[in-house]
Image (cartoon, helix red, strand yellow):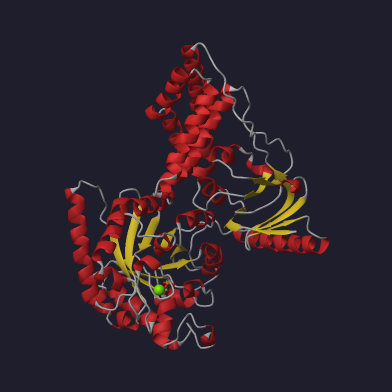
Amino acid sequence: MIVTGKSVFGGIAIGKLHVLAKSDEKVKRLSISDAEAEKKRFNDAREKSKDQLKVLFEKALKEVGEDNAQIFEVHQLMLDDLDYVESVENMITEEAVNAEYAVAVTGDNFAEIFASMDDDYMKARSADVKDISNRVISILSGNGEGEFTEDEPVILMADDLAPSETVQLERSLILSFVTRFGSSNSHTAILARTMNIPSLIGVDFSEDCNGKMGIVDGYEGKLIIDPDEETLDDYIKKKKADDEKAALLQKFKGLDNVTKDGRRINLYANIGNVGDVANVLKNDAGGIGLFRSEFLYLESDDYPTEEEQFRAYKKVAQNMNGKKVIIRTLDIGDDKQADYFDLGKEENPALGFRAIRICLEKPEIFKTQLRAIYRASHYGNISVMFPMITSVKEVKKIKEILGEVKAELDRESFPYKDVEIGIMIETPAAVMVSDELAKEVQFFSVGTNDLTQYTLAIDRQNPKLDAFYDPHHPAVLKMLKMVADNGHAAGCWVGICGELGADTTLTEEFLRMGYDELSVSPSMILPVRAAIRNIKLK
Ligand code: PEP
Ligand code: MG
């Protein structure tokens, strides 16, 4: 039987299914006579909860890093929240009820308030307030934590998993997470990604699969329950091939991106969302060479606020821990449409109102993003780059807007760094004036996907033209050389962030052209590193 869901992290897991039973006993309402004693029981349980959370924080800090561990600090703070504590205490006093009941009702009320908020971040706090309340109730009623007692690795299935539950589980015993509910932005999903565990959410499984054999296909978002022999054999082979491929490449982790004769190059990764950072680190990239920031806009029903963007950029910068993070500003339009932009239908959308053109026409949207990026720069090593540039005039205008944004931030006393600025070279016009453009910025990153489309006049979305879409065309390669030479002549560093950067048949040529950086999808870091280390230029 196959049940589908949404993949949170790719990979294949094969093993016994373990459905985690929720201790769903309803908390009983009891009358009490000594309110003071009951409040003391509550406050003792609250203190004990905080002690447990401190231990969890330390454990998570070691296993999944500071950023992911922070949730347990947030939980400690929530337990000290005056509104929360007073609400429980008032209920105990005024209604003469037991502490368990007062905590359960308060927890539900607060969770409902959070869930009804517009802000996605605040919405997600609903699960956290339930989590802390359950912890206190569990201590009050003398229950131990967690009923996961398997001693062989399993595919763990649950309605949902609170972050505290996830991190407490013994990692070596978990092959995969499968949940009925949960969102890709939940902390648990983030933790699953950080732990490199194939995971699915939104899977409507039935309880009776507990104990059966199962396969999680994190590539295709499928759970196969009780697979027949042929399917099982098939997946055993797929998993073996996966493991072999990964194992072979592991030996390149921690090594330099250096040719046999000593030429070095930076190897960075391309990401589309905050969660991809785990994969970047796992694959040992030296930084993020392209953060396609438009995902924030595409996932949203309305323009993402400055705060929402600031949180996302800050998180990526912090998780990268001082390594370079190049944020590409909004590149919406053409195939990437969000209804609320109301861009209207265009005859030639690839040549239409998109990317930097929208930003320059609607500076209020642009400024919101730039403010968020600059504010986040304080927390890491952020650079910014601009897509679809065709002229020096555009870059001068961008710099003017940047000046305004910085002046605003100064007035409001927001700290920010001297952010390195660069542009994407993805139009033939930009290539031809790259000598002039290089005087305005600190780096170039060539977007070969669009540069190929515009140079060869071939729609990159049209499958009928696949045979004609040739990024190895001499016109494209000559442009790449020209960009590198013009960039270097003016002191810019130059990189490639289009798909061609990962084409190992061209790695040697890119090095000969003098490229300083290649930015590729995380899974291509180690294969490209292997290629670089095999090259001799002299
Ligand atoms: C490119 O055009 O090569 C590029 C990296 O940008 P995108 O693929 O997002 O258009
Ligand atoms: Mg592009």
| Quadrant of the rendering where the N terminus is positioned | bottom right
Where residue 275 sits: x, y (%)? 49, 54
Q: Residue at x 50, y 71 (%)?
A: 502
Where residue 436 sits: x, y (%)? 23, 77
Answer with left or right where residue 336 lies relative to residue 130.
left
Q: Give above or below for 340 relative to 377.
A: below
Q: Quadrant of ligand 2?
A: bottom left
Seen from this angle, which residue lies furthest right?
A: 229
Front-most of residues 348 and 331: 348
Q: Residue at x 26, y 67 (%)?
A: 362
Q: Residue at x 53, y 15 (%)?
A: 32
Query: Is residue 67 visible to us here?
Result: no
Q: Quadrant of residue 350?
A: bottom left
Q: Quadrant of residue 497?
A: bottom left
Q: Give above or below for 467 relative to 35.
A: below
Where residue 93 sits: x, y (%)? 44, 17
Give the total of numbered labels.
Answer: 0
Answer with left or right where residue 78 lies relative to residue 197.
left
Query: Is residue 217 visible to us here?
Result: yes
Where residue 139 sits: x, y (%)? 57, 24
Q: Residue at x 58, y 43 (%)?
A: 161
Q: Give above or below for 398 relative to 454.
A: above
